[in-house]
Amino acid sequence: MMSEEQLKYLRILGEEGDKKYRLTGMFKNWFLEYSSYVILERAIPHITDGLKPVQRRILHSMKRMEDGRYNKVANIIGHTMQFHPHGDASIGDALVQLGQKDLLVDTQGNWGNVLTGDSAAAPRYIEARLSTFALEVAFNPKTTFWTSSYDGRNKEPEALPIKFPLLLAQGAEGIAVGLSTRILPHNVNELLDASIDYLNGKDFTLYPDFITGGLVDCSNYNSGVSKDGSRVKVRARITKLDRRTLAITELPYGQTTESLIRSIIAANDKGRIRVRKIDDNTADQVEILIHLAGDVSPDKTIDALYAFTRCEVTLSPDACVIMDGKPFVLPVEDMLRYNADRTRHLLKTELEIRLAELEDNWHLSSLEKIFFEEKVYKILENDAPSWEAQLAAVEKEMKRYQDRLRRPITFEEIEKLVEKPVRKISKFDIKKAEEHIQSLDKEMSRVNEHLSHLTRYTINYFKDLKKKYGSLFPRKTEIADFETIVASKVILANSKLYANKDSGFVGTELKNDEGASFVCDCSPLDEIVVFLKDGTYSVRKVEEKQYVGKDIIYTGIIKKKDERTIYNAVYRDGKGGKVYVKRFAVSSYTRDREYNLTQGKPGSQVLWFTVNPNGEAESIKVFLRAKPRLKKLIFEFSFLDIDVKGRGARGNILSHHPVQKITLLEKGVATMGGQKIWFDKDVQRLNHDERGLYLGEFSGEDSLLAVNKKGVFFTTNFDLSNRYQEEILLIEKLDTEKVFTALYYDADVEFYYIKRFRFEDSENAPQPFISTAEGSRLVALSQDASPRVEVVFGGKHAKREPLLIDAVEFISDKSFRAKGKRITTFQVDSLSFLDPLPVPVEEDIDDDPGFELEGPVEEDTTKKEKKTGIEKKVKNSGHDEDAIQMTLL
């Protein structure tokens, strides 16, 4: 006899034939039901109102409790449990998330901090109520479809009649069974504008906006559809306070100050960045101060923070929603179109309901007016066999006036009419009733007008929302194009590379190896090139210790696409072969592949080898081995005499005879011109790729001048890692002899000033050239040689004629630190530069008149006498030559 436990397992295994208890049946029915429930009822939002069920139930409960005052969150949770069967914890977490989005819920108390990750206080200590925005857009019981709650005791909305793209405004994240969603939040104003554009038949584009601010690159957003490769890069906003301090003032979406600082410390521990100290001063606003070591570049550190820490994160949106009871992946533009159409439908329903109410009101008001105006009520004073007979008589009399009504009179309406109290008869005012009916007619006309032009009415509805609430929702995340940061270019060179040229080992852990010598500083992401004496070379990754081959003649860091580094080489082609000379660059390569700078014959040998970062071409002295009949044993050669060719080129023949040795005759000069630099204003970076504004060729000690719109300038070198974060007004090669003219407003004295000055080298330190008083601003900056300024007066002096100023005559050029000269004491409407004055051209004076005079030329004796008199006076003065010149003047 089997026990009950054994019978249970037999049922599960299908021994009794009940498919419900077989494993296949369990997976087909139970798991399917479970997964469908999680998808539809918990994790994925519905497109109709943009809410998950728990969010919808919370808002519905708050609406039922709404009285204008705050309610304890614990009380809200308790009320919501009438509709939501999953306990108080899930309701509390969902309510806190709604409150932190700062859109539908007005909060009071400690609701946590999305910036620091601090959690909210206990539900009994915090309070909430519906926001004014939520009360306007989210509720209307007349247009709501209701369903029974989970226990059948209450009614809850199937979907809230939300007349706004709430799902796109709040965003949503959820993980279901085999399905997930991630819809990024968007800006409220931009959603309203896009809805208006859609209803007007215009194209629109949506980009995410995050409550934590930061910067976002939406070039691969692709409407938030994962199958289309949707990717969004988000960065923290990092600014330079000075050469040794960086400030993080905004966070990437999904990060907190704690997680960000933790990632920075981890990168510092791995040696990828070098940070001296981190201060977290975050409260209402993010402020993380990163203190750098003195010898660390702040620009390079910013790039390294983006490359190696959570200061830059990549988000992968997946816009999955529930529509018609099934999950769908929709582009965000389609979601907005659906919501705009649904808003129009809801507004139409509201108008139709309002019109029906107005018509009912008009009909009843008209009945009442006729009832009293035509004294139909007096029929009730007559004797009748029964009350029903009196009602029939009233109905018969009222139907005589059917032509004054818009729909048939019903018996129920007659019953309501005769129930009017007697005092209503005595106080009834026919004129007021007429005015009321006329007002109803006007309102019905307006409603019919809105129904006839429903799209226009919907557009005006969205415009009114933006007018009322738009100022509350400015865009917080800046849309920008991110440049690709190559990690190997920004990682800190915190390791030292050593090479043992005899044994053939290279690596960072050879410091104590006998015979190893220091090569250079490097990072784990660098690549090194190794040249051997037999002419073979290869590119390898930096490792702790690796064998590369004996007889190393050179090893060092190499960069791809580097065409400025030129290798000069002299080699023997095979044993006893000719001697060749060549110049080449290694701009492309495959790691760990062996190359050969010779022709590859056995016995080949490199006799001379130099590495030249700027294409230097040295001169060498070649000593040949003595041979019979060989007279010239020594000759000189300059690498300037040959061209730079590809690495596979054979080169030129230097000698047909064996070479004994080669020595340096003269160091080479750079053969490469200056580096051509462009400025890409979209990413605020320098480049060699001909993107953006061409700045010129830079070499040596050249500097770049950058001026921003705040009236601050700074100079930098032309390193491509430089960052120009403020809005740049002017960027060009620094010319310390160039005179600029600036117009600015000094808020300290409330006057406009003009100044002419030369910019100086600031060595990457920001320097203001206008007043630093709060409210001061740069009006205009000119680099014309002879600028003219037009001053248009305003205020009580608006009738004065505009003032024209020749800047060169008005003020001389001084230091950029000088205050300048006040333009006027009158009220100014605007200042602007006009076309500059023409620069005078110096003409050469030709003493030769170009013709000959006929006959003798008479001398002007009067001038001669005057000159003789001056000369005599000078001779008698007895002064030196300078004194004579001054006397002549």
Image: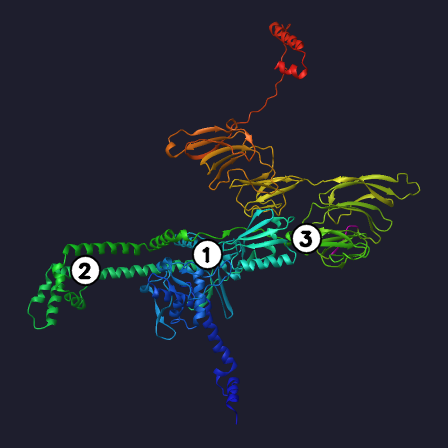
Q: Amino acid at mark 2?
A: Ser
Asked which quadrant contains residue 858, the reply is top right
Q: Locate residue 37, reporting x and y percent.
A: 45, 72
Q: Dot 2 corresponds to which residue?
A: 365
Q: Earlier in the sequence, mark 3 or mark 2?
A: 2
- Left or right: residue 237 versus residue 494 is left
Closer to us: 130 or 210: 130
Query: In what element is the residue under mark 2?
Result: helix
How many residues crowd mark 1 within 10 Å: few (<14), some (14–19), many (20+)?
Answer: many
Judge whether residue 594 is colored magenta: yes
Q: Dot 1 corresponds to which residue?
A: 186
| Visible residue check, residue 277 | yes
Q: CA distance from mark 2 to mark 1?
A: 48 Å
Closer to us: 582 or 519: 519
Asked if 301 appears above or below 794 in the picture, the reply is below
Q: Dot 3 corresponds to which residue?
A: 493
- Which residues are drawn in magenta? 593-598
Asked which quadrant contains residue 703, the reply is top right
Q: Locate residue 565, reporting x and y percent.
A: 71, 46
Q: CA distance from mark 3 to mark 2?
A: 88 Å
Q: Earlier in the sequence, mark 2 or mark 1?
A: 1
